[in-house]
């Protein structure tokens, strides 16, 4: 099954930037292609050192495609499609809801921005839709996270050239930790601003 999915991704990539856009949709809507987009973008960047606009355009298509796929999954959950109930056992669904209630959109941002996500993104996308989180807030978080991730990978590929894959392999967890730390800082600042805006009782 995994081999078939990678063949599908290879066929999509053959169509250039529009294929990358479709790959982003397929990967984000719930059909898992682990790290396929990340490896692809880094590879394109390495090969596009003399023409960086090609890699940057590919990153833009990846962001648009991934955003579209996540919005589709979020919208399906928001409408309460019956098949979503089978995405996780009841105990895990309750745990994911508790995490979401406690950490809010941070639970979407962290796995969306991290190449090696510590938690499954699609489960929290579904949770965000099921709990009817603001569409605007959800869209902002997804676009921000995917932009940081995909354009960041392209930047690393352009900067390091053929050394980029090895660099990411050696420092993947460090970069993931930095992303999580940045997300936590963003969350704390957002909560501070929100508390400052609330009128004193």
Image: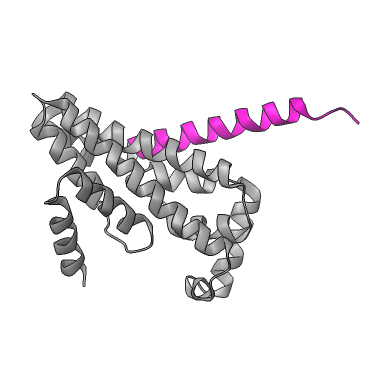
Q: Which residue is drawn at 54% across and 30% down?
A: 185
- Is 49 covered by the magenta stretch? no
Q: Nearer the viewer, residue 171 or 7?
A: 7
Percent coordinates x, y for residue 84 in the rendering:
50, 71
Is residue 119 at all visible to an observer of this figure?
no
Q: Residue at x 52, y 58 (%)?
A: 75
Is residue 192 at all visible to an observer of this figure?
yes
Above or below, 12 against 94 in this view is above
Percent coordinates x, y for residue 133 in the rendering:
62, 51
Percent coordinates x, y for residue 77 in the rendering:
54, 63
Above or below, 113 against 15 in this view is above
Name which quarter of the figure residue 172 lies in.
top left
- Is 182 covered by the magenta stretch? yes
Percent coordinates x, y for residue 66 in the rendering:
36, 48
Q: Give the range drawn in magenta.
A: 175-201
Chosen colour scheme: one colour
Q: Nearer the viewer, residue 87 or 177?
A: 87
Q: Nearer the viewer, residue 122 or 60?
A: 60
Name which quarter of the figure residue 128 lies in.
bottom right
- Which quarter of the figure is the N terminus placed in? bottom left
**Total marks in image:** 0
Q: Main secondary structure of the magenta part?
A: helix
- Which quarter of the figure is the C terminus placed in? top right
Q: Which residue is drawn at 53% across and 35% down?
A: 184
Residue farthest to the right, as pictured: 201
């Amino acid at each position: 099954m995994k081999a078939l999915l990678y063949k599908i991704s290879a066929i999509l990539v053959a169509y250039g930037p529009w294929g990358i856009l479709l790959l982003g949709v397929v990967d984000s809507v719930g059909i898992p292609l682990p790290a396929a987009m990340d490896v692809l973008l880094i590879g394109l960047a390495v090969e596009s050192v003399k023409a960086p606009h090609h890699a940057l355009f590919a990153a833009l298509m990846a962001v648009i495609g991934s955003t579209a796929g996540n919005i589709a999954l979020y919208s399906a959950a928001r409408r309460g499609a019956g098949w979503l109930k089978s995405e996780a056992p009841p105990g895990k669904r309750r745990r994911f809801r508790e995490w979401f209630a406690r950490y809010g959109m941070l639970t979407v941002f962290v796995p969306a921005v991290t190449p090696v996500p510590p938690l499954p993104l699609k489960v929290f996308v579904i949770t965000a839709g099921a709990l009817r989180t603001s569409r605007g807030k959800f869209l902002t978080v997804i676009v921000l996270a995917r932009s940081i991730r995909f354009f960041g990978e392209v930047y690393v590929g352009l900067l390091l050239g053929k050394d980029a894959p090895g660099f990411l392999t050696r420092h993947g967890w460090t970069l993931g930790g930095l992303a999580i730390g940045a997300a936590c800082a963003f969350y704390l600042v957002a909560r501070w601003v929100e508390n400052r805006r609330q009128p004193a009782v």
